[in-house]
Amino acid sequence: MPPLLVCGMLCHMNLTDSLLPSDLLYFANLIWFAVGLYALRSAPWRLFLANSRIQHVFLGATVVLFLMWNFEMGVHPALGFHFLGLTTFTLMFGWSLGVIGASLVTVAVTCVHGHWAALAMNALVLGVLPVSVSYGVYHLVHRHLPHHLFVYIFLCAFFNAMLAAGVAVMTLVVLLVATDTYTFARISYEHLPYLPLYLFPEGMLNGMVITALIGVRPDWLKTYDDETYLKKY
């Protein structure tokens, strides 16, 4: 039986306190604080606080992310897989609230699993980074490509989710190899072969959720507007 299935839920995608050097983890705290402060200052608080619907949707989506992040499969610590769902979250709320929501989920997951010293690094790699990639891809697509419904679904949701998750995973791999936590040979044998099996479902999940939201609750998507994407139909 493949080692991925044998280990099941025992290993986590999150970094643990002992995997990376303490000075690197401390430096991550400084970066996370700076990014978090900017997100807090740039978030649309006036609109958010004035609209209870947005508050409820944000809270519900954050809880869903927390539940998703607690179900994962892996081989060794920090070499697990779980659905991120952050591309959908970012398309729903934008970059600032995306960073804030992902950070809140990381804190909640840390409350469950521990490893507080690695909290900031996990928040950056598994939260801020995929949110930033997701919003960056959306911005580029929206600016340079036709405003077409299928362009939004396939590039901003499906492909975007695969890319954001792939960047997060490969960043973890680089950190682990650069700090001699694992050898690249070991990761390439025990972890990377399963990466396509993780990325495609990640893209499918986000693409399906975005498609459903467009059909049922387009007002939940900050980055989507019927008049913009459906004007040719």
Image (cartoon, helix red, strand yellow):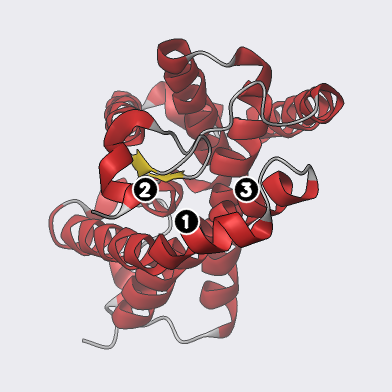
Q: Nearer the viewer, residue 60 or 77?
A: 77
List x then y, in percent, for residue 197.
33, 65
Q: Residue furthest left?
A: 216
Which corner quadrant of the image does residue 63 belong to?
top left
Q: Residues within 10 Å of mark 2 (few under 14, many from 20)?
A: many
Dot 1 crowding, Cα within 10 Å, few <14, some 14–19, many 20+: some
Place of residue 146 in the rendered image (x, y in percent of width and height, measured from the top left): 46, 87
| Picture quarter with the C terminus | bottom left
User: Is 16 positioned to the left or the right of 149 in the image?
Assistant: right
Query: Could you say which is closer to the camera, residue 34 or residue 47?
Result: 34
Q: Which-is-in-front pick, marks 2 and 3? A: 3
Question: In front of the other: label 1 or label 2?
Answer: 1
Q: Report whether residue 135 is seen.
A: no
Residue at the spot x=34%, y=47% of the render?
83
Residue 201, compared with residue 148, is above or below; it is above
Mark 1 vs mark 2, CA separation in Å = 24 Å
Tag in front: 1 or 3: 1
* Residue bearing the label numbered 3: 172
Discs 1, 3 touching: Cβ within 8 Å: no
| Residue drawn where x is 13% and y is 55% of the image | 216
Residue marked by disc 2: 85
Q: Secondary structure at mark 3?
A: helix
Which comes before the other along the chain, label 1 or label 2?
2
Label 2 sits on what residue type?
Gly
Q: Identify which amino acid the numbered label 1 is placed on.
A: Glu
Image side of residue 20 versus residue 77, left or right? right
Label 2 or label 3, whichever comes before in sequence order: 2
Q: On the image, which quarter does residue 120 sit in?
A: top right
Residue hosting label 1: 190
Quarter assignment of residue 158: bottom left
